[in-house]
Image: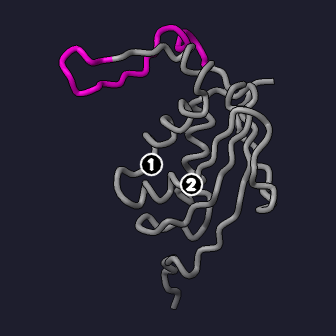
Amino acid sequence: MKTTVMANDKTVVRKWYIVDATNIPLGRVASQVAAVLRGKNKTIYTPHVDTGDYVIVINTDKMILTGNKATDKYYYRHSGYPGGITAVQYKDLMEKHSDFALEKAVKGMLPKNSLGKKMFGKLKCYKGAEHPHQAQQPVELKIRGGRA
């Protein structure tokens, strides 16, 4: 008789992946990175256990936004005071803080609980091609649907 295998923290083996986000849409990178952070690419995926891997994303400053999102989409934040709302166009956000734009997109795709915070901690984003994680020997992860 076969039994269902449930993963736990002791049985999960974590790998390091590196993603080059050059000429790939922001949403496509975010959705596929979020799936790897959750562990949905593994056969031992268990919803209540963090089975995901570490992901390093480089060249976030070279990601693209499709359609009119660069000018029509805004990032909002509020100070908590009356009239304290601030809006920033994604065009400006991508120029100054493209790593933050990707982090915000990925965070919205993860669970909204302590498990999601643990998964989000395994995401490392960098604007350029340099990163300090060479010792972990990351394996390249190809994002499907990139533009040439």
**CA gap, disc 2 to disc 1?**
8 Å
Viewer-closest of 60 and 82: 82
- Position of residue 146 relative to residue 112, above or below, is above
Where is residue 106? Give x, y as percent: 51, 41
Viewer-closest of 81 and 46: 81
Task: Tell me whether the residue at label 2 lies in contact with that at label 1, contact meaning CB atoms closer than 8 angstroms.
Answer: yes
Choose top left, top right, bottom left or bottom right for residue 17: bottom right
11 left or right, relative to 23: left
* Residue span colored magenta: 65-85
- Position of residue 39 relative to residue 108, above or below, is below
Which residue matches tag 2?
A: 37
| Mark before the other along the chain sequence, 2 or 1 | 2
- Looking at the rendered structure, the secondary structure element under dot 2 is helix
* Tag 2: amino acid: Leu
Q: Image quadrant for the C terminus?
A: top right
- Position of residue 6 relative to residue 61, above or below, is below
Which residue matches tag 1?
A: 110
Label at residue 146: none
Where is residue 58? Give x, y as percent: 73, 39
